[in-house]
Amino acid sequence: MIRDSLQDKRVLVAVPNWLGDALMVTPVFKTLKNRYNAYTAVLCVDRVSDVFRDNIYVDEIIIFDDRGKDRSIFAKFKLLKKLRQQKFDVAFLVQRSFTKALIAALAKIPVRVGYQRLKNRFVLTQEVMPAHFLCHRQDIYFSLFKQAGVVLEERIPQFFVPEDIRSAIGDKVNELRKNHVRVVCVHVSSNWEQKRWPPHFFSWFCDQLVKDFNCAVIFIGSSKEQNIINRVTSSMDCDYFDFCGKTSLKELGALFSAVDLVVSNDSGPAHLAGAMGANLIVLFGPTSPEVTAPRGENVTILSEEVSCAVPCYKKTCTNNICMKKITVERVVECARKILS
């Protein structure tokens, strides 16, 4: 068993490239550190590096993006050289990347664990049959470790925020509380359009929160999502606060832990809110909660049954009935139970 060779070893974990998926893997590092006293390094793209920064169970972050700035042969040789110098004992390739698996092999990492795929056959020392694709994505990632003998007990992701950031964000939220009874974060975007609740639904919902609870409604997201937020706010009657593009990932985590409620489509920020223990309502349509629901202690999933097959990844769908069937009244009622 691989677990027998982990004690006091140097372990490299290549993680997925997306925020929600990267967060799902974070409990692994606590186990590797506490149970095996391993030196832990994460191999990731820059956009998810903050997921692991300040994590007390992660010793090193190695940034590598073979589909972006590290596409060149020179960049790949640079990573190869670094991994050889680091003399890792074990590599877990959670991300299904042949390039990373090949580099791990060329770096002479003795134990290389990854998913069973035809092209991985000659670069891995242990191939793992992944869990069924309709089970939760985290279970697929954890299967890589479990089948290697590593027991993972915790499932809620861990995201560490420095105290100075928590304090600064807490001060901003407290300022809002001087004139508002409740503070609510809303994320109206997602990585593809069919996963988004209609903008005018969000407009009605937010107006209702302000009227019923004297809420300070904060819109969050990256600067690239500003147009989507504008479509929502342009139809609102009540005041709101636009934090779009104004928070780092650490600041967003601190914000989620300080507010009374987060409402979001199925998205990366929803996973972060779950990890921070926020009261969270997630609206699911074409994707399946059984596969991608955020992990957390205070997560509420809202979805409706439709005649279409779910999960559905038909990005050309113009009907989007799965999201439209989630009524504003239902989301308001769910929010009311949490806020009161």
Image (cartoon, helix red, strand yellow):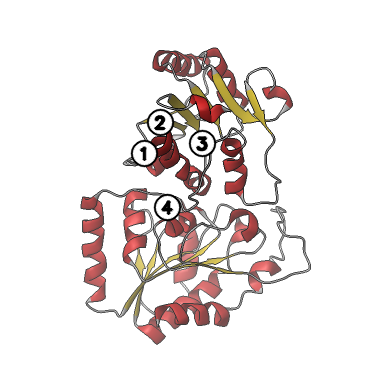
Residue 170, given in percent of the width and then of the height, sits at 24, 62
Q: Are marks 1 and 4 in contact (CB under 8 Å)?
A: no
Q: Are marks 2 and 4 in contact (CB under 8 Å)?
A: no
> How many residues crowd mark 4 within 10 Å: few (<14), some (14–19), many (20+)?
some
Determine which residue is flagged by label 4: 222
Residue at the (72%, 54%) spot, across then down: 314
Using the image, tell me which numbered label, if any, was put on residue 137: none
Using the image, tell me which numbered label, if any, was put on residue 15: 3
Residue at the (45%, 27%) spot, across then down: 11
Q: Amino acid at mark 3?
A: Val
Check disc 1 and report its element: helix, strand or loop: loop
Q: CA distance from mark 1 to mark 2?
A: 7 Å
Check disc 4 and report its element: helix, strand or loop: loop
Determine which residue is flagged by label 1: 57
* Res 79 seen here: yes
Q: Are marks 1 and 2 in contact (CB under 8 Å)?
A: yes
- Please indicate whether residue 290 sits to the left or right of residue 233 in the image: right
The residue lying toward the viewer, choosing from 146 and 98, is 146
Above/below status of 285 relative to 40: below
Q: Quadrant of the N terminus?
A: top right
> How many residues crowd mark 1 within 10 Å: few (<14), some (14–19), many (20+)?
many
Check disc 2 and report its element: helix, strand or loop: strand
Q: CA distance from mark 1 to mark 4?
A: 28 Å
Q: Nearer the viewer, mark 1 or mark 4?
A: 1
Q: CA distance from mark 2 to mark 3?
A: 12 Å
